[in-house]
Image (cartoon, helix red, strand yellow):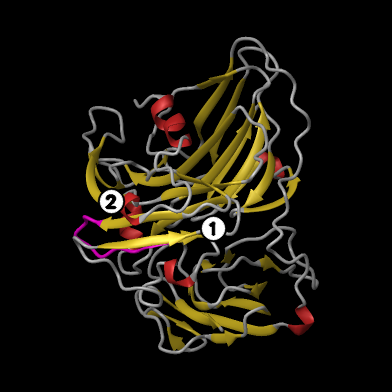
Amino acid sequence: MLTTRRIFLGSLVATLALAGKAPAQEMRVLSARRAMKPLFPEPASPLEAFTFNESLPGPVLRVKLGEEVALRLANELETPLALHWRGVRLANAMDGAVPLTQAAIATGGSFDIAFTPPDAGTFLYHPSVRTQAAAQMARGLAGLLIVEEPKPPVVDLDLALLLADWVEPDTSSPRVLANGALDTDPIALAPGARIRLRLASASTRRMMAIGVEGARVQVAAIDGQPCDLFEPVRQTLPLAPGARYDVFFDLPAQENGDTKLLLRGMSGAPDSSRTLVTFTTTGAARPALPPLENLPANPRLPEKIALEKSKRIDLTIEGEATQGWRINGAPATDLPAKPLFAVKRGGPVTLGFINRTAAPQLMHVHGHVLRHMHLLDDGWEPYWRDSVIVPEGRTIRTAFVADNPGKWLIAGGFGVGDGPAGWFEVS
C-alpha cells in the first residue's frame, strides 16, 4: 500500500514547478515512458503503465496566474503522442489537436510547449492523437495543471485528486484508482481544518458519482471556471470523463471525526460503493475560519452572451463506432478538410448538439468554455463547462463567445477516443 504522504501530499507540491518564463536551456522535460507500477495489493504483480517522468498519474504542474508553462514533451513510447490541455483557453498552436495545430510526436521525438494560461483553475492534460489517446490514457497517461489565483483562499490542505479506471489482473472489471492507488491511508488534520479538493476524472468512458460523508461540501468551480458557491444534490458530484470540480469543506470540529470521499453507484463494478479517501481529525482544533466566499469571478469571461446576435449552428451526430460517425451527414471519424463553421473573433455562437446515435456522446469544445442552455427557456446554467454530455436521442444547446482565434477541435465519444469529431475556425 502506498502511503498518504507519497500519494497525496507529494502531488500537492510543484512536482514539476514552472515559474516565470523559463529560458530554453532551463526548460523542464516531461517524458512519456513505460514503467512498472504496483497498482493492486499482493499477490498481484506490478502492471506496465504509461507515465510522465515515471509518475502515475503525471506530475501536478502548478503555476501562478500570469506565469508561463514551459516544458519539452518527449515521447519515449512506441506510439505517436501529442498533449491537450483540457479547459485551458490557450494559444491555438499549443492545443495539441493533431493534425489541426501540430503533427504528432513520433517515437524518440519531442515538442516544445509554452503558453501562459489566461485563467486560474484546475485543468487536465492528456494525450490527444485520436487513434492513440484512449489507449494511452487507459494506461495512466494524464495529469493535472493547477493555475493558482493571485490570492488563493486560506485552506489547511489543497488536495489534487485524479481518478482513473484500471482493470485488475485476472478480472474483466475496472477499478477506480485515486492518484494511482487503490487503497490509501487516512489523512490526519486538525479538527475544523478546511480542505480544497481539486477533483478530476481521467476515465476514458464512464460517469462516476462521487459523494462526501461527514462534511458539508460547497462547489466553487467547475471545469476550471469559478461559479457561485452551491451544495451538490445529496452531497454527490456527477464526474464525467475529463471533468473537474473545485470543492471546499471543513472537517468536524471534534477529535476522531471522519470525513469520507465515496465512490457511489457504479452498477456491476466490484467497487460500486467504496471509500476512496478518509480524512480524520486529531489534536487541538484549529482557530475558526471565516465563512467561505466565492472564488473571484473570471473577468475574461462575459457576464452575458448576446444570444439574439449569435451565429446559430446545429451539429447532428449519427452513426456508430464500428461503422463510422457522421456530423451533419459528413464522415467525421477522420477530420474533414472543411470546418463545420467559421466565425469572426468575438462573435457569439449558439451551438446545438443533436444526438441521433444509440449512445450518449460527450462533446468537448477546444479553446473555449460554454454555457449550457436551459431546455425549457432561453436562459443558461449558472456555470461554465468545456464539454457537454448529450444523451442518446436528445438535443443539448450551448452558447459561447468565439474569442480565441485559430482552428479548434470539437471532439466526441464518451471520453477521449475515436468518437465523432470536426472543427471550427475563429478568424
Q: Considering only vertical position in the picture, is 399 above or below 206? A: below
What predominant SS class does the magenta segment belong to? Answer: loop
Mark 1–mark 2 Cα distance, whole angstroms, equals 21 Å
Amino acid type at mark 1 = Pro
Amino acid type at mark 2 = Ser
Residue topped by disc 1: 117
Side (left or right) of 309 relative to 108 = right
User: How many C-alpha atoms fall within 10 Å of the one at disc 1: few (<14), some, or many (≥20)?
Assistant: many
Residue 411 appears in the picture as rendered: no
Q: Position of residue 24 (x, y in %)?
A: 34, 56
Q: Is residue 385 magenta?
A: no
Residue topped by disc 2: 31
Stretch of the chain drawn in magenta: 75-84
Describe the element under mark 1 as helix, strand or loop. Answer: loop
Q: Residue at x 64, y 67 (%)?
A: 370
Describe the element under mark 2 as helix, strand or loop. Answer: strand
Location of residue 78 by image quarter: bottom left
Side (left or right) of 393 relative to 185 = right
Looking at the rendered image, the quarter that the N terminus falls into is: top left
